[in-house]
Amino acid sequence: MSKDIHNDSVTRLFEAILTLKDVEECYTFFEDACTVNELKAIAQRFEVARMLKENQTYMKISRITGASTATISRVKRSLDYGEDGYEMVFSRLEEKEKNETEQELNNNLQT
């Protein structure tokens, strides 16, 4: 991450985001904080990163997400040379999904 974004305003924003409790609260906050296009652009980049992690081709990613090859290349550069933010989040989501699946299996065994 570029060091020039490390400032009090960005820190306060991130701290505010960390107070959100669930997806519905995220919708409520981000619908106020971002334009529809800003939110869609962030979501698109996240989807591009997920698909790149799954080794999908640029052509397929572009077709499914509507992202330009320039956007896909920028996301790829972040995955390869960035601060590992995407990897951190993907790893946590994978762990969360694994735990939820295990919990569901345990609940099914108990019934």
Image (cartoon, grey):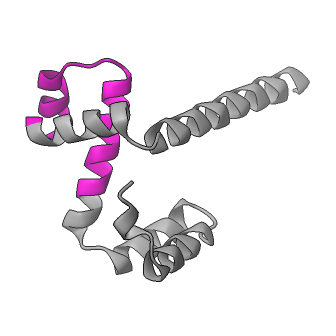
Q: Which residue corresponds to the image point at 35% horizontal and 30% vertical from the top-left? A: 80
**The magenta segment:** 41-69
Q: Quadrant of residue 39?
A: bottom left
Which residue: 10% across, 40% down?
70
Residue 21 position within the rendered picture, expressed as x and y whole percent measured from the top left: 64, 66
Drawn side of residue 79 relative to residue 94, left or right: left
Image quarter in which the N terminus is found: bottom left
> Does the image show residue 30?
yes
- Residue 37 falls in image quadrant: bottom left
Quarter placement of the C terminus: top right
Q: Is residue 65 visible?
A: no
Residue at image x 37%, y 20%?
54
Decide if residue 55 is on the left or right side of residue 69: right
Q: Nearer the viewer, residue 7 or 90?
A: 7
In-front residue for pair 110/37: 37
Image coordinates of residue 2 in percent, x first then y, are 35, 58
Between 12 and 8, the one nearer to me in the picture: 8
Relative to 65, say whether 111 is above or below. above
